Amino acid sequence: MYSSVFGGITTDQSAMVIPMDDHMVHRGHGVFDTAAIVDGCLYELEQHLDRFLGSAKQAKINPPFDKQTIKTILVQTVSASSCRNGSLRYWLSSGPGDFQLSPTGCHQSTLYAIVIQDQSPPNYSGIKVITSSIPIKPPQFAIMKSVNYLPNVLSKMEAEENGAYAAIWLDQQGFVAEGPSMNVAFVTHENELLMPRFEKILSGCTAKRVLELAGNLVKEEKVRGIKVRDVTVEEGKRAQEMMLIGSGVLVRPVLQWDNQVIGKGKAGVVTVSLRKLILEDMKSGPSTIRTAVPYV
Ligand SMILES: Cc1ncc(COP(=O)(O)O)c(C=O)c1O
């Protein structure tokens, strides 16, 4: 763990603590992001860092360091952990100070980072999703990755209570939005890859990368085109393929949404091809996408 409160990295689990008077703890005034560690490289660190700093700006948190310093700290934290496969999660907070609502008593914003070792083998099997009855966050809050994940947690719990993997949010207009920690995409009957617009949901780094990599499938004529636009529930439910996309799930086929079986009820060609492309990209993509960790 790295903490700017003690100004260093520790591998002692009992020292991995944050102060109770940090406003991220008792007021939720903090933002976070996560990057995957794959074979000793941080995947899409730059892209996650840009989103992280964007979230901080929207939450009016002035980071304690510039982007390059934060990046160096994050890479050093992974290096100190010796972890080669897992994830790196990091937070910016308005910092410790008092127990008021206003952050004016917080004299220094804080940066925390933690390395999480992968424990279980990846699971790419098809899953069931339901429509979330927990309301989606309003756009102003949905587009930033703040620590206020209560709606996301309740939505995930609702899915689990109903034998599903995730609950899908619809936006305020009733269009398909996203899952509690992932984006969604479809393959239409016209064989087009279709993703909801990012204006009212989190701009997923994995989903954006999938859109880039999907160009290969257009060239190979596995899909006819790529569209990012509003998607109705009806259109989504009668799609040929549906998938969840994110740093955690990567690309995972959805076989059933509520009572509706999607397509033929098994993983589709496009979903499987996109998962292959993202896995290859994680292992051997360009240096703009992969940051090698200099382990000691
Ligand atoms: C609400 C939400 N949507 C989408 C995503 C997917 O984003 P990414 O691909 O950057 O992990 C996440 C990831 O944490 C998320 O929390």
Image (cartoon, grey):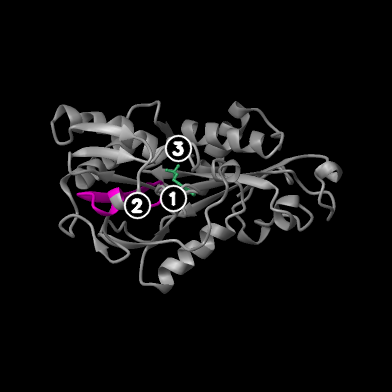
Residue 226, image x, y percentages: 27, 32
**What secondary structure is marked by label 1?**
loop
Query: Mark 3 to mark 2: distance in Å?
Result: 16 Å
- Of mark 3 and mark 1, the one earlier in the sequence is 1
**What secondary structure is marked by label 3?**
loop
Q: Which residue is mark 3?
A: 198
Q: Are marks 3 and 1 in contact (CB under 8 Å)?
A: no
Mark 2: amino acid: Val
Of tags 3 and 1, the one toward the viewer is 1
Mark 1: amino acid: Gly
Residue 238 on the magenta span: yes
Q: Is residue 108 above or below residue 268?
A: above
Q: Are marks 2 and 1 in contact (CB under 8 Å)?
A: yes
Q: Which residue is mark 2?
A: 233
Task: Mark 2: give few (<14), some (14-19) or many (20+) Cα within 10 Å.
Answer: some
Residue 189 on the magenta span: no
**What secondary structure is marked by label 2?**
helix
Q: Is residue 204 above or below residue 288?
A: below
* Viewer-nearest residue: 77 or 229: 229
Q: In this picture, which residue range is highlighted in magenta?
A: 235-251
Q: Which residue is mark 1?
A: 174
Q: Is residue 119 visible?
A: no
